[in-house]
Image (tube, rainbow, N blue to C red):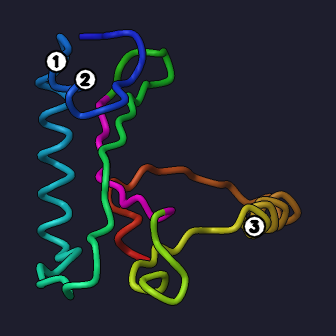
Amino acid sequence: MFVDGDPMTHQEALSRSDAECWKKAMYDEYDALMSNRTWTLTELPPDRKAIKCKWVFKTKHDANGNVDRHNAHLVIKGYSQRKGVDYTDTYSPVVRHSSLRYLFALAAKHELTIDQLDATTAFLQG
């Protein structure tokens, strides 16, 4: 089933004709977060507010342009953090583009083959 464009909110995702695909993607994400023990529920100090989160949706296509799968990721709104208050409490490692360019150049120099894969919970394995 194909609907033009990816949903912007979870309400939109669940009100579309492909809602079951998005619901499964959200359950898969939730299961991955829980099985990897991504967080621990705690009581917030009285002077603190929880950092909000949102769902991000992306339709993955195969080489022929057909819908391969639906991805849903629960992401934290890190831009709401404040330095000196909660800025170092949440961290997600990312690769620098210059590091990737170096590795590609090295592979080209030594005539190495580069393989690509899509790991669903790679971001949890910093």
- The answer to which of 92 and 70 lies nearer the viewer is 92
Q: Check the image and report above or below for 100 versus 81.
A: above
Q: Residues within 10 Å of mark 3 (few under 14, many from 20)?
A: few
Circle 3/circle 2 CB separation < 8 Å: no
- Say what secondary structure mark 1 lies in: loop
In this picture, residue 10 sits left or right of residue 65: left
* Residue lying furthest right: 109
State the mark number for residue 12: 2
Residue type at tag 3: Leu
Disc 1 to disc 2, C-alpha distance = 5 Å
**Which residue in the structure is indicated by mark 1?**
15
- The answer to which of 77 and 112 lies nearer the viewer is 77
Disc 3 to disc 1, C-alpha distance = 43 Å
In this picture, residue 86 sits left or right of residue 48: right
Disc 3 to disc 2, C-alpha distance = 39 Å
Q: Quadrant of the N terminus?
A: top left
State the mark number for residue 27: none
Residue plotted at (68% across, 55% down): 113
> Percent from the top left, x then y, of residue 34?
12, 67
State the mark number for residue 103: 3
Residue type at tag 1: Ser
Circle 1/circle 2 CB separation < 8 Å: yes
In the image, which residues are magenta? 69-79
Residue type at tag 2: Glu
Q: Is 1 a magenta residue?
A: no
- The answer to which of 6 and 126 lies nearer the viewer is 6
